[in-house]
Image (cartoon, grey):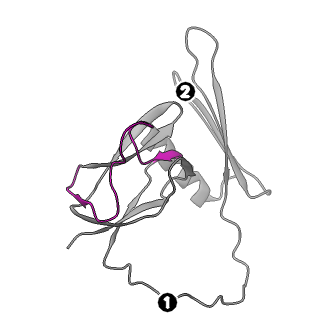
């Protein structure tokens, strides 16, 4: 079971309203629980020849929308013409391939489809995030070395 399948399973369980789902396969055991404390707990255990590592992640579930007073908006910039590049995984966002190297892209950098924009570290693996479109980087939405969630916006790209 790959990371994308696990992410899709998490989204499905969150939308279904189920309180707990257990999945056991040959080398993977996953339990997804949603509780009244507005939190989703994911426990993944992968047995290997030696001791089996257990990874626990706590992901805040979206809180119920409470009526709030309208906040005066700053002058809005029309972002509808831009393409948003989102994080495909949960992890730590890095703008550089390593601390002594330059950043992958800056605001104003022209990128082509498939160009590496950043890396996201997840469980000691560095995943290169590639551009989905050709265009110019308009805005970097995440600070370097910051944690990111699944589907969190990372970059705005002007495809024109």
Image spot of residue 65 (x, y percent): 69, 76
Q: Which residue is mark 2?
A: 28
The reply to whether residue 126 is visible in this rendering is yes
Q: Residue 150, image x and y in percent?
A: 51, 53
Residue 34 versus residue 75 in the image, above or below: above
Image quarter of the C terminus: bottom left
The one of 20 and 102 positioned closer to us in this rendering: 102
Crowding around mark 1 (Cα neighbors within 10 Å: few <14, some 14 to 19, many 20+) is few
Image position of 114 (left or right of 55): left
123 shown above or below 77: above
- What predominant SS class does the magenta segment belong to? loop
Report the residue that reaches farthest toward the front.
Answer: 100
The answer to which image quadrant residue 47 occupies is top right
Local packing at callout 2 (Cα closer than 10 Å; few below 14, some 14-19, many 20+) is: few
In front here: 21 or 38? 38
User: Which of the labelled discs sits on residue 75, or is there none?
Assistant: 1
Residue at 58% x, 60% y: name it: 15
Labels 1, 2: front one: 1
Does residue 64 appear left or right of residue 123 in this picture?
right
For residue 85, which quarter of the picture? Answer: bottom left
Q: Earlier in the sequence, mark 1 or mark 2?
A: 2
Label 1: state its secondary structure: loop
Taking depth in this image into account, of 54 and 148 the one nearest to the observer is: 148
Whether pointer 1 and pointer 2 mark residues with C-beta atoms closer than 8 Å, the reply is no
Residue 41, disc: none
Asked if the stretch drawn in magenta spans residue 96, the answer is yes
Most extreme residue toward the right is: 37
Q: Residue at x 73, y 79 (%)?
A: 66
In this picture, which residue range is highlighted in magenta? 89-114
């Amino acid at each position: 079971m790959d990371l994308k399948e696990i992410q899709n399973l998490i989204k499905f369980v969150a939308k279904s309203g189920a309180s707990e789902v257990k999945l056991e396969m040959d080398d993977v055991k996953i339990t997804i629980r949603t509780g009244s404390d507005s939190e989703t707990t994911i426990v993944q255990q992968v047995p290997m020849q030696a001791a089996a590592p257990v990874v626990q992640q706590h992901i805040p579930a979206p809180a119920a929308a409470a009526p709030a007073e309208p906040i005066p908006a700053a002058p809005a910039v029309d972002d509808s013409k831009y393409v948003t590049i989102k994080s495909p995984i949960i992890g730590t966002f890095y703008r550089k391939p390593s601390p002594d190297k330059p950043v992958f892209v800056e605001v104003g950098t022209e990128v082509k489809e498939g160009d590496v924009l950043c890396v996201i570290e997840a469980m000691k693996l560095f995943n290169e995030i590639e551009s989905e479109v050709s265009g110019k980087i308009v805005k970097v939405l995440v600070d370097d070395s910051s944690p990111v969630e699944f589907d969190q916006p990372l970059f705005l790209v002007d495809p024109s």
